[in-house]
């Protein structure tokens, strides 16, 4: 028989209110999960959040069937099917640890122990002897009959409480230590969502204590905590420089090496020229890593993020795409977000031009040119010797010959001539 619009509406209105709440939460959290994954599919926090919310959404979808059926056997079967969704609780701790950048050496044993404990709890709950031992239907609502607090139930509550306390302590410590306004706001949202979860949990237990009546609404109000994480991700974007601060299309097609470092001096973006240098560095025997290819870039970027300067122009010895080394003029510019936090550093490095003309004009040998380039990059005599694999005494002899050829008295005058010439010859 075909239903009219009115009859459909009446059926919806006549549904169990708890089932309607489950339907709303299931759809809302599913959309939230998909949206956040869409923001940055490569971000580990976003991927974990997506899995966590999918588990929660499945829990709520199954709960719709639980509250809609009058068959106890079917109800119990559906209840068992919700058991895997409980894994989303330790996943929240996993996400918080990533947010606050906890050491992987510390994270690994803690998370391994907690996930292992939850595997045990899931097995216990699947056999209906962890939290609820029976279910009764009264006036169209299913009531959960809680188990007596045996050792497994007590252990479960201890682990659950430990997860919440760990999250709170990590967030508070993060709030106190971070110098970024954006991260402080993230921490406040998370603490607020945890506080609301505690309030709802307390009210739930008070009602149960006086009425001995449990409608199983934990599945509904526990979403406050993961939704708080979701709001923080959307509003403040964990672990990322806000979009729009750099353009892949523009920077990827210019000759200079361009890269963006985040607050932890990790590379967020490198254009094609910078990527070629990184590839040459990785392929060079005895070398490897960002520092080997780009000299003191991470050190300078870190000092700028700590507030020492907003913009700098430095001469650095950096690797060329062919594996050789040359002096580069590198401009460093701090990136600020809308909260005026220093969230990254933009580096544009251009290889100095006119080296052959410079050498020819002053009768500089190739080895002497290597020494000058290293000196211009700020290396000491010992560091130049280590770079060129010759003795420090030989470096001093080269410098003496260079001073004589250029008619200068010290390294400062030498570097000034070298930099001035290189920039005059640059296009």
Image (cartoon, helix red, strand yellow):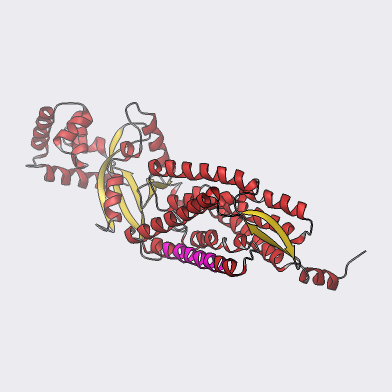
Confirm whether residue 13 shows in the render.
yes
Confirm whether residue 241 shows in the render.
no
Q: Position of residue 318 (x, y in %)?
A: 30, 39
Task: Please tell me which residue lies in front, 409 or 107.
Answer: 107
Task: Please tell me which residue lies in front, 127 or 191.
Answer: 127
Q: Which residues are magenta?
A: 187-204
Answer with the quarter of the image where residue 333 lies.
Answer: bottom left
Q: Position of residue 179 (x, y in %)?
A: 32, 60
Residue name at image x 16 percent, y 47 percent: 416
Q: Is residue 370 above or below residue 252?
A: above
Answer with the quarter of the image where residue 409 lies.
Answer: top left
Principal secondary structure, stretch drawn in magenta: helix
In the picture as drawn, the residue positioned furthest to the left comes out as 409
Q: Position of residue 336 (x, y in %)?
A: 37, 61
Query: Is residue 5 magenta-colored?
Result: no
Where is the N terminus found, in terms of image quarters?
bottom right
Residue name at image x 52 percent, y 41 percent: 116
Q: Is residue 423 above or below residue 168?
A: above
Taking 4 as reference, is 229 left or right?
left
């Amino acid at each position: 028989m075909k239903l009219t619009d009115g009859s459909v509406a009446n059926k919806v209105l006549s549904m169990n209110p708890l089932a309607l709440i489950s339907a709303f939460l299931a759809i809302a959290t599913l959309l939230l999960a998909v949206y956040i994954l869409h923001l940055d599919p490569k971000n580990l926090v976003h991927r974990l959040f997506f899995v966590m919310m999918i588990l929660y959404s499945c829990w709520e979808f199954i709960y719709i069937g639980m509250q809609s059926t009058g068959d106890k056997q079917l109800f119990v079967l559906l209840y068992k099917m919700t058991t895997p969704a409980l894994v989303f609780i330790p996943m929240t701790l996993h996400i918080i640890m990533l947010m606050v950048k906890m050491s992987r050496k510390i994270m690994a044993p803690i998370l391994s122990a907690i996930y292992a404990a939850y595997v045990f709890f899931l097995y216990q709950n699947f056999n209906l002897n962890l939290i609820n031992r029976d279910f009764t239907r009264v006036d169209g609502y299913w009531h959960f009959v809680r188990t007596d607090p045996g050792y497994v139930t007590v252990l479960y509550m201890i682990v659950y409480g430990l997860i919440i306390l760990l999250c709170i302590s990590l967030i508070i410590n993060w709030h106190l230590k971070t110098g970024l306004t954006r991260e402080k706001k993230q921490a406040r949202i998370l603490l607020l969502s945890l506080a609301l979860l505690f309030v709802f949990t307390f009210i739930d237990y008070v009602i149960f204590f006086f009425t001995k009546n449990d409608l199983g609404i934990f599945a509904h109000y526990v979403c406050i905590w993961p939704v708080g994480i979701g709001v923080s991700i959307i509003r403040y974007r964990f672990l990322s420089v806000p979009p729009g601060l750099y353009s892949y299309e523009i920077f990827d097609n210019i000759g200079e090496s361009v890269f963006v470092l985040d607050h932890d001096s990790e590379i967020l973006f490198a254009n094609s020229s910078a990527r070629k240098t990184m590839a040459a560095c990785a392929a060079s025997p005895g070398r490897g890593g960002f520092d080997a290819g780009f000299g003191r870039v991470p050190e300078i970027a870190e000092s700028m993020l700590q507030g020492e300067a907003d913009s700098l122009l430095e001469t650095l010895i950096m690797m060329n795409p062919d594996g050789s080394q040359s002096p580069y003029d590198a401009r460093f510019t701090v990136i600020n977000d809308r909260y005026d936090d220093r969230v990254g550093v933009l580096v544009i490095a251009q290889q100095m031009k006119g080296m052959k003309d410079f050498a020819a004009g002053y009768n500089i040998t190739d080895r002497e040119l290597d020494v000058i380039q290293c000196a211009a990059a700020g290396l000491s005599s010992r560091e130049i010797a280590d770079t060129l694999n010759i003795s420090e005494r030989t470096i001093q002899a080269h410098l003496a010959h260079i001073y004589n050829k250029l008619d200068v008295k010290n390294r400062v005058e030498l570097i000034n001539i070298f930099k001035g010439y290189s920039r005059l010859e640059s296009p």
